[in-house]
Image (spheres, rainbow, N blue to C red):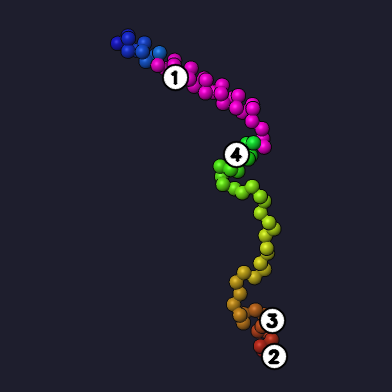
């Protein structure tokens, strides 16, 4: 039983060392990467385009039924 616990303890210690190595690598990567590169990678991962979209067209009346506007009713009444 003591051997099993010792083996488990050694395994946990090895895992802890590996996590520490990954953490150090992560900290180094964070220090070495710039804001522009982070934004570029984020945009590429989300599939956004490299160019800004053009100006949007405004549509004052997207859907209109003929004959229902006030001007048309007044014009038809005359």
Tell me which numbered mark, 2 or 1, is placed earlier along the sequence: 1
**Which of disc 4 and disc 2 is earlier in sequence?**
4
Rounded to the nearest whole Å, what is the CA distance between mark 2 and mark 4? 64 Å
Q: Reading the chain from its start, which is encountered first: label 3 or label 2? A: 3
Residue with the mark numbered 4? 41
In the image, what residue occupies the spot 67% across and 51% down? 52
Residue 28 rendering spot, x and y as whole percentages: 60, 24
15 lies left or right of 43: left
Which residue corresponds to mark 3? 71
Q: Position of residue 5 (x, y in %)?
A: 35, 12
Q: Nearer the viewer, residue 77 or 40?
A: 40
Can you tell which of label 2 and label 1 is closer to the viewer? 1
Separation (CA) of disc 3 from disc 2: 11 Å
Residue stretch rendered in magenta on the structure: 11-36
Q: Which of disc 1 and disc 3 is earlier in sequence?
A: 1
Check residue 18 for magenta coloring. yes
Earlier residue among tags 4 and 1? 1
Mark 3 closeness class: few <14, some 14–19, many ≥20 residues within 10 Å:
few
Which residue bears the numbered disc 1?
A: 15
Using the numbered discs, state the Cα–Cα distance from disc 3 to disc 1 in whole angstroms: 78 Å
Residue 52, compared with residue 60, is above or below; it is above
Dot 2, crowdedness within 10 Å: few (<14), some or many (≥20)? few
Q: Nearer the viewer, mark 4 or mark 1?
A: 4
Residue positioned most to the bottom = 78
Can residue 15 be found in the magenta stretch?
yes
């Amino acid at each position: 039983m003591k051997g099993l616990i010792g083996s488990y303890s050694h395994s946990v210690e090895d895992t802890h060392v590996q996590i520490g190595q990954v953490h150090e690598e992560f900290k180094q990567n964070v220090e070495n990467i710039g804001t522009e590169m982070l934004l570029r990678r984020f945009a590429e991962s989300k599939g956004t385009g490299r160019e800004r979209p053009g100006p949007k067209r405004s549509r004052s009346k997207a859907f209109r039924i003929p004959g229902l506007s006030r001007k048309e009713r007044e014009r038809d009444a005359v």
